[in-house]
Amino acid sequence: MGSVNDKVVLALIGAGGRGTQVILSMQKCIPGVEVKYVCEVDQERGGRVIEELEKQQNLRPKRLDDMRRAFEDKDVDAVVICTPEHWHALATIWACQAGKDVYVEKNISLNIPEGRKMIEAAKKYNRIVQCGFQNRSAPYNISAREYIQSGKLGKIVLVKTYCMLPGNKPWLLKE
């Protein structure tokens, strides 16, 4: 490769379904991406993405069970965080402290103070932190925002949100 900037070395942190989907897309669609590590604490996960990445990039990523080992590697430019949400803030802060740029999946944090600490770390360590909020720019969200801003709903005093995705919802109480 001609320039140092021709290659970006990544580590995937969290190799579940979403992590696998995100990293395979990044590696396949963005020229010059090399995934050096797949970090996953669950020994049942990660094998498939390692096999697929090896096919795509002709280089087998190393499996780690501790994300901090990837943060220590000076060759790693950035990390892709797709862990369960309760790890997003700490993993992002650790990555920023280690001089890594970050792509972190949604939900970004569990609460506002965590999110603020993530922003503080990005600023303090001069890192780029990109958050996975693809749906924010979807046409249906833009039209909903415009309708709300138009004032046609009147003064909004209460908002309730619902998760309408299919799947197991263990947090719902059974009757």
Image (cartoon, rainbow, N blue to C red):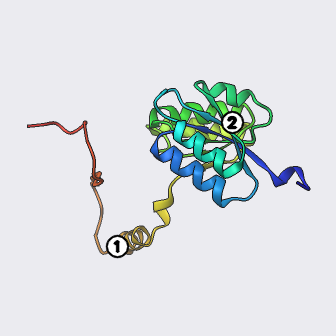
Do the residues bearing badges 1 and 2 touch, measured as CB atoms within 8 Å? no
Compared with 58, 44 (above or below) is above
- Residue drawn at (72%, 47%) of the image: 58
SS at mark 1?
Answer: loop
Seen in the image, is 86 located left or right of residue 162? right
Compared with 18, 142 (above or below) is below
- The quarter of the picture where the C terminus appears is top left
Q: Is residue 127 visible?
A: yes
Residue 34 horizontal/vertical position (percent): 72, 46
Please tell me the numbered disc located at residue 129: none
Please tell me the numbered disc located at residue 151: 1
* Quadrant in the rendering for residue 142: bottom left
Q: Give the labeled residue for mark 2.
A: 96
Residue 71 horizontal/vertical position (percent): 70, 30
Seen in the image, is 78 located left or right of residue 92? right
Residue 9 horizontal/vertical position (percent): 74, 44
Q: Please, what is the three-letter code of the amino acid marked with disc 1?
A: Gly
SS at mark 2?
Answer: helix
CA gap between label 1 and label 2 equals 40 Å
Residue located farthest toward the right when viewing the structure as drawn: 2
